[in-house]
Amino acid sequence: MTRTWPSKLAADEGALAWEFLDFLRKTAVLKVEGLTRDQAVAAPIATSEKLTALGVLKHLVAVERYWLCIAGAGLDLPSLWEGTPDPSWDLTDDDTPESLIQAYQEEWANAEALKQRRPDDNAADGERTVRWILAHVAQETARHVGHLDLLRELADGQTGE
């Protein structure tokens, strides 16, 4: 997967926000890609039993689904957050690095519907602008990419930006 830095001479705030999110998305995938399932489901931090590379990626699928696709674009899709505590971190036997990377990329395709809206448009929920939703998803993704950095290093020693 190729990832490129956003334009340093960007003039369009909305386009720049999407470019940064795309960079972060691809970084998350690169942190999981190449791990075995055993490495990806390992929970090396004793106090955080659900903090696994696959758990983070599955949670990011739910983040994109809810914020970009449902709240932002108004798509009629089921939320992946139904339940307490948040089930988006729970893994099944069918969850693999490949299956969750595919699910994540499918949400990117669903989120294309949000790109058609102006950044200052109110979201479908009437409470937030598209700009706010996009900034929220970018900060959430960046936060979890940091977790993936550490999890990948603990899994196989691989580091990188």
Image (cartoon, rainbow, N blue to C red):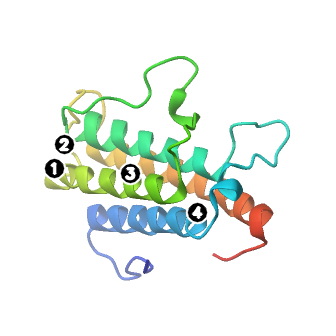
Q: Residue furthest top?
A: 84
Amino acid type of the residue that numbered disc 1 sits on in the rendered structure: Arg
- Looking at the rendered structure, which numbered label has been put on residue 117? 1
**Sequence-wise, which precedes: disc 3 or disc 1?**
3
Q: Closer to the observer: label 3 or label 1?
A: 3
Q: CA distance from mark 4 to mark 2?
A: 34 Å
In the image, 69: left or right of 64? Answer: left
Q: Closer to the observer: label 3 or label 2?
A: 3
Q: Are marks 4 and 2 in contact (CB under 8 Å)?
A: no
Q: x%, y% of residue 1?
A: 43, 77
Residue at image x 53%, y 53%?
96
**Sequence-wise, which precedes: disc 3 or disc 2?**
3
Q: Quadrant of residue 15?
A: bottom left
Residue at image x 40%, y 53%?
104
Q: CA distance from mark 1 to mark 4?
A: 31 Å
Q: CA distance from mark 3 to mark 2?
A: 27 Å
Q: Quadrant of residue 85?
A: top right
Whether 30 is drawn above or below 142: the answer is below
Amino acid type of the residue that numbered disc 2 sits on in the rendered structure: Asp
**Sequence-wise, which precedes: disc 4 or disc 2?**
4
**Sequence-wise, which precedes: disc 1 or disc 4?**
4
**Sequence-wise, which precedes: disc 4 or disc 3?**
4
Q: Closer to the observer: label 4 or label 2?
A: 4
Q: Which residue is mark 2?
A: 121
